[in-house]
Amino acid sequence: MTKVAPSTNSKTGQENASGGYMRSIIIIGALFFIFGFVTWLNSLLIPYLEIACELTKFQSFFVTFAFYIAYLVMAPLSTRVLTKFGFKNGMSVALVVMAVGAALFIPAAMTRIYLMFLAGLFIIGCGLAILQTASNPYITILGPAESAAKRISIMGICNKMAGAAAPIILGFFLNLEDADKLKSEVLGMTDAAREAALNEMALQVIPPYIGIVVVLLILGYWIYRSSLPEIDTDAEDETVAAANTGKKSVFAFPHLLLGVFSLFLYVGVEVIAVDSIISYGVSYDIALTTAQYFASATMVAMVVGYIIGIIAIPKYIKQENALKFCAILGVVFSLGAIFTSGYVSVGFIALLGLANSLMWPAIWPLALADLGRFTKAASSLLVMGIAGGAILPLVYGALADIINSQQAYWIMVPCYLFILYYAIAGHKIRTR
């Protein structure tokens, strides 16, 4: 298998000049599309399973908990998988694991057992943890470090375009009009009628998830047979090697640890924005058939931000400055959602997509800077930070039950303020 050294090595320039570089970009872009599609189905699954499995709002947000906690559990093992199989074959293994999780939705829908749905989501999350551990450092190191955010922005467009399409496509399979009616009628039904109606509703998720299983398996085989080059993350240039002399582990890099926490907070607020917006719209008595498009609006806002990043980074704005600007927007839009109401408030939540757009592309290269041989271990640590998508939305769901869905958005403000600190100073801390 062909190995490509990190961007500090001259071999990377040769790779960049070849068609292999563009093929690698296309293949990784396809991966970002598919895990974006699978990830952002959750925004519609939350209100749908809330009805089908008769859940409270807090219970419904265990969808995000089961999905994202897998990153925390699996990330340490992801490094071992990549060490054993390499980046390319590790990605194939990840896609097969995801297919197994998606297949579990079939018996879950047949039995309408919520824990089985959560188990399927957890297994999908485990596969994604491996995929994220491989694909993010891969695209970061594949080219020049100063344009890493631009490449990740391209991947982000693939991811978020899939995310915009996911709830709409899933909505074609789920009878949302009947779901809206069932939500209001279920209390007046007999036990037998209610069970029959809810069982029929749950079965509607089977066809789309069969399709997902097939696509994941095909993509896994395609990756396995592809000419995707292996990247040698253990290679270091002389400057990085000298700087890392005497360092025994990733915990010797404060800028990485702060980056992990920033990523934890970022993923948490991003998942809150995307996965709560549909149910938040429903709380204003907006029909589910209309609200299903709100998550797509958030994704479109993110795509706009990614396009800006592709054009502006690094030519007009540095990665850390883009992160500063996005964090400030996050605070402004969060307060806008809290202090307005109706469609305007929902609109501010959708605009958080713009605020969140360049955070992932900026945090990864800032956190992985100058890590050399520690890159794989650092990547798995960063992937553990994705568990913010498990914890913070669950806290949001609890607050929404205790207070209300709107005031629960206060949880996002301090998160954005810490990300702003990381953009200003945290990423510069190199010694403890």
Image (cartoon, rainbow, N blue to C red):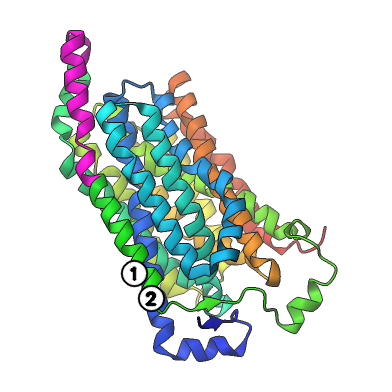
Rendered residue at 45%/63% (across/down)? 91
Measuring from the top left, give residue 235's x and y in whole percent: 67, 78
Q: Tell me residue 272's x, y (percent).
A: 44, 40
Q: Secondary structure at mark 2?
A: loop
Tell me where residue 294 appears, x and y as whole percent. 28, 43
Q: Is residue 343 visible?
A: no
* Secondary structure found at label 1: helix
Residue numbers of the magenta segment: 186-208
Determine the residue positioned at 58% across, 49% down: 385
Give the residue pinned by disc 1. 222
Q: Is residue 368 above or below residue 236?
A: above
Residue 378 visible? The answer is yes
- Residue 226 is marked as 2
Of 114 and 1, nearer the camera is: 1
- Based on the displayed image, in which of its 4 quarters is residue 63 positioned? top left
Residue drawn 41% across the image and 69% down it: 28
Which residue is more in the foreground, 336 or 378?
A: 378
Residue 108 within the magenta-colored segment of the rendering: no
- Residue sitting nearer the eye, 317 or 148: 148
The residue under label 1 is which amino acid type?
Trp
Mark 2 and 1 residues: CB-CB less than 8 Å, in contact? yes
Q: Position of residue 307 (x, y in %)?
A: 38, 68
